[in-house]
Image (tube, rainbow, N blue to C red):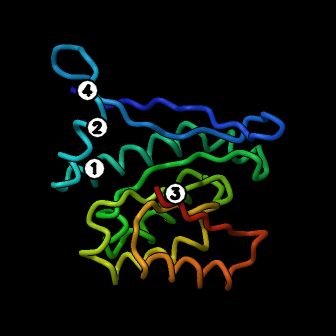
């Protein structure tokens, strides 16, 4: 009973209002057929390994749904995907992501990753290592984590990375 499904919210450039891509949003329908808010099911999933399954579902869906469009866009099309900090702190995350992108022929310059905040600090070493790996094959890496170590890592990586190939964007709310 696959009650999860994807919706894609368009994102436009502010200046010229050109479509720049989409943000991938996972949705859930309850047994009664009514939608369950992500504000309800994501925090529950983040407290278990279910969040890893959700991340996998989202990545597979995005790469399947947008690989051809992204490939033809020559870097002018981006899909933003939220990845849990719990997932990015897994040792195999960066390799698995790169392998999945290769399987779907999804171009790296069309992927924007936003790391959710939960669990960021409890697995800091592996999170930083994966960020250092992912930064070389994702167009944007966004975090709303309020961590000095993450901020320093991203700032250092930004200084070392070819801006034409990579950009890092920090967002603090």
User: Would you place residue 147 above or below residue 75 in this image?
Assistant: below
Residue wearing tag 1: 53
Q: Are marks 4 and 2 in contact (CB under 8 Å)?
A: no
Q: Label 4, label 2: how many angstroms apart (C-alpha)?
A: 8 Å
Residue 120's image quarter?
A: bottom left
Q: Nearer the viewer, mark 3 or mark 2?
A: 2
Q: Position of residue 131 (x, y in %)?
A: 48, 74
Tell me what residue is drawn at x 54 percent, y 77 percent: 154
Labels 4, 1: front one: 4
Instruction: Name the mark nearer the viewer: 3 or 1.
Output: 3
Residue located 29% across and 30% down the image: 37
- Alpha-carbon neighbours of circle 2 within 10 Å: few (<14), some, or many (≥20)? few
* 36 shown above or below 114: above
What residue would you read off at disc 2? 39
Check disc 3: other Cα within 10 Å, few if <14, some if 14-19, many if 20+: many
Q: CA distance from mark 3 to mark 1?
A: 17 Å
- Figure check: 151 above or below 139: below
Are the residues tagged 3 and 2 within 8 Å (C-beta)?
no
Q: Which of the marked residues, 4 or 1, is nearer the chain's N terminus? A: 4
Residue shown at the point (56%, 60%) measured from the top left: 102
Secondary structure at numbered mark 3? strand
Q: Is residue 128 left or right of residue 54?
A: right
Indicate the secondary structure of the residue bearing disc 1: helix
Instruction: State which tag comes first along the sequence, 3 or 1.
Output: 1
């Amino acid at each position: 009973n696959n009650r999860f499904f994807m919706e894609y919210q368009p994102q436009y450039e502010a200046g010229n209002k050109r479509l720049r891509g989409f943000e991938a949003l996972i949705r859930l329908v309850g047994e009664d057929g009514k939608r369950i808010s992500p504000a309800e099911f994501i925090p529950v999933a983040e407290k278990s390994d279910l969040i890893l399954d959700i991340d996998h579902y989202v990545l597979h869906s995005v790469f399947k749904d947008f690989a051809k469009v992204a490939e033809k866009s020559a870097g002018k099309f981006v899909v933003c995907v939220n990845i849990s900090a719990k997932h990015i702190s897994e040792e195999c995350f960066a390799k698995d992501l790169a392998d999945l992108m290769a399987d779907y022929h999804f171009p790296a310059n069309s992927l924007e990753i936003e790391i959710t905040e939960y669990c960021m600090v409890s697995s800091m070493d592996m999170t930083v290592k994966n960020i250092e790996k992912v930064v070389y094959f994702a167009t944007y890496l966004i975090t709303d984590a309020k961590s000095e170590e993450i901020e320093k890592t991203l700032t250092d990586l930004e200084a070392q990375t070819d801006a034409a190939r990579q950009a890092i964007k920090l967002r603090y709310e």
